[in-house]
Image: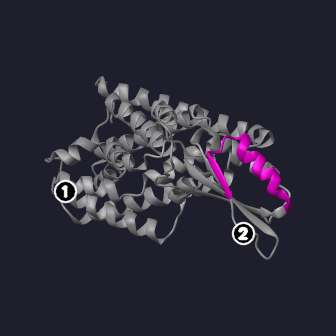
Amino acid sequence: MRIVEVVADAKHAKTLAGMARFYGAVDYWWGNTSADGRCTIRMLVPDEKRQALIDSLQDLFIATDRARIVVQPIDATLTHEGPAQRDANDNKEKTVSSTREELYTQIAKGAQLDSNYLILTVLSTLVAAIGLIEDNIAVVVGAMVIAPLLGPNIALAFATSLGDRDLTWRALRTNIVGVSIAVAISIAIGLFLPVGLDNASIALRTDVDLASVVLGLASGAAAVLSLTTGLSSTLVGVMVAVALLPPAATMGMMIGAERWPDAFGAFLLLTTNIVCVLLAAKLVFLLKGVRPRSWIERNRAKQSILIYFSLWVVLFLILVAVILIRTTGWDIPW
């Protein structure tokens, strides 16, 4: 559960209490009325009711800027309950979910192009390049964990589900800048350090097959499920599984070493991972019902949703076709 705290003009007090009861709040209580005439009500709201309540609250306060809605996490809530109530609670399905607004706050952080993102990208690229050259799996895994490249991709899929153009362009810009920095640094490393295919870490990331496609799709779906269910700790495993940074670093080093076929193989792996993550994340967001709040916003978002989804499907099919051509061993210069 979460605590939904509402600060609004005191004239809304009865309406807010009625909404708390209507949307099945386990409990609600009032704070003091402030000097500016606003009151505070806190509602302990089950997960399955929270999105509907927040949507109704936003509709109620659409014409005023004096109201504020705050969603607070809770670690535990204790009360006296009899055996019957305890058995009923134990038999309930234990699910954790996040509202659209909570997801937006969390996911939008991954689209921020700030100094922390740039520094982490530079450091993780250096760590990944060293790990790849030395064929040190532990170092490569460490680079995967600290690399911030997954965030902008999840934010891009989320933004297109809501038809949010501002977040879409921010996520796209952050993604392009992050990948460009990783590739540029890796090219410089490939120019000055000896890079070969005599170690498994580099050779593994210059080739791609259908297993890479399945891995990318599964990782993208797992990332969104971990966010929408509140189990964000599993994102660390997703970062390691989908591995966007090592193929980017490998591609840059192969370009620096002028190994063009290997650079194309790493580029194909990186592109496959990105497209599969975007496509799977988009599908899960749609299945989870993540969409704009109002009817007008939903209609406005339909066009952008259709365009982006069609684009990713077309790119996915092209990538699968290229992978099949490469794996069948046709006589092509790739």
In this view of the protein, which residue sits in the foreground, 225 or 278?
Answer: 225
Q: Amino acid at mark 1?
A: Ile
List the single residue furthest toward the left: 198
Relative horizontal placement of residue 181, taking residue 309 as reference (left or right):
left
The kind of residue on which mark 2 rests is Asn
Circle 2 residues within 10 Å: few <14, some 14–19, many ≥20:
few
Q: What's the magenta bit mostly, secondary-structure-wise? A: helix
| Residue at numbered disc 1 | 133
**Where does the magenta region start and end?**
11-29
Please state which of residues 101 and 12 is positioned toward the viewer in this rendering. 12
What sort of colour scheme is used for the picture?
Answer: one colour
Find out whether residue 24 is within the magenta segment.
yes
Q: Is residue 290 visible?
A: yes
Residue drawn at x 60%, y 32% is: 310
Q: Quadrant of residue 189?
A: bottom left
**SS label for mark 1:** helix
Is 189 on the left-hand or right-hand side of 220? left
Disc 2/disc 1 C-alpha distance (Å): 63 Å
Q: Secondary structure at mark 2?
A: loop
User: Residue 32: which numbered mark, if any?
Assistant: 2
Front-most of residues 244 and 69: 69
Residue at the image point whose x is 63% and y is 44% from the top: 50
